Image (spheres, rainbow, N blue to C red):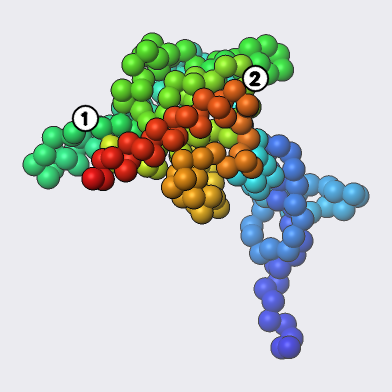
Amino acid sequence: MKKDIHPSNYREVVFKDMSCEEIFITRSTVAAKETIEVDGKEYPLVKLEITSASHPFFTGKQKLVPLSYWAEWVCQCFSFSAPVGCAVKWFAQHGKTLPAQKGLLTAEIGCRKVKGGTISCLSSIPLLNVKSIVECFTTSPKEVLFPEPGVDMDMHYMKLRFALPSKKISYLGTIFITTLESMFFYMEENWEMLCDDIEKGIINPKVRITPEAYNEYSRKFKQLLTDFFNNKR
């Protein structure tokens, strides 16, 4: 190996995930303006907003983001109206009108408790105001979009199971892009299972779901399978 080929600033650097305080030490040439002491040794410090230590795809845990009433209103209005508006514009540019179709929403709307009290996480406004008609414009049933407190289900699986067989999807709606990204990662990792379950009209035994929901959705998925093949004839 040739000598003196490494950059002069190739040294050990601490990368710190600011959302969970996790640190990683590795070699890098990245520029750093701050330093940090770890186990009595000083290292250059690079701060990161998110890493594998905090991203939901790697942790398997949903990250709750506290929002004010007004910020939540703006986020939900934008996340719901923006994709629909883009779809309307695309159809208009092609001399068409947006057909009466549905969209895949990635959110679960409900209140959750965290340390220090109760916060509203993707809740109450404005989607709760249209809860009674939400199935008219989304592929997911109300029980998936508005889960009861404490319900533990694999929501990515449930939403994709209702959305993928549908031919009436014209938009994807999300408030946080990482939620949509996480769903796409899930689909990439589990596409064979999803396709197999859709084809057979079943729920894979490995999927996290309550017994009550399993019985209810098993019937719905079998009906979706029947409807799908009836529409192909």
Q: Is residue 133 left or right of residue 214?
A: left
Quarter of the figure that contains the C terminus:
top left
Q: Position of residue 152 (x, y in %)?
A: 63, 27
Q: Nearer the viewer, residue 83 or 196?
A: 196
Q: Which class describes the residues within 10 Å of circle 2: few (<14), some (14-19), or many (20+)?
A: few
Give percent across and percent down for residue 50. 61, 43
Quadrant of residue 227 in the image?
top left
Q: Residue furthest left?
A: 95
Mark toward the start of the polypeptide (2 vs 1): 1
- Quarter assignment of residue 165: top left
The amino acid type, in three-letter code, at marker 1 is: Ala
Measured in 3D between alpha carbons, the distance from the residue under mark 2 to the one under mark 1, in whole angstroms, is 34 Å
Farthest residue, direction bottom: 2
Element type at mark 2 = loop
Q: Residue at x 72, y 17 (%)?
A: 115
Query: What is the quadrant of residue 11 in the picture?
Result: bottom right
Q: Looking at the image, which is closer to me, 98 or 119?
A: 98
Discs 2, 1 touching: Cβ within 8 Å: no
| Residue found at x 60% / y 44% | 57
The image shows residue 176, relative to residue 31, as above or below, that is above
Question: Which residue position holds label 2?
Answer: 150
Residue type, mark 2 in image: Gly
Residue 175 position (above or below residue 4)? above
Q: Write down the residue under mark 1.
A: 100
**Residue 64 x, y percent position in the rendering:** 60, 27
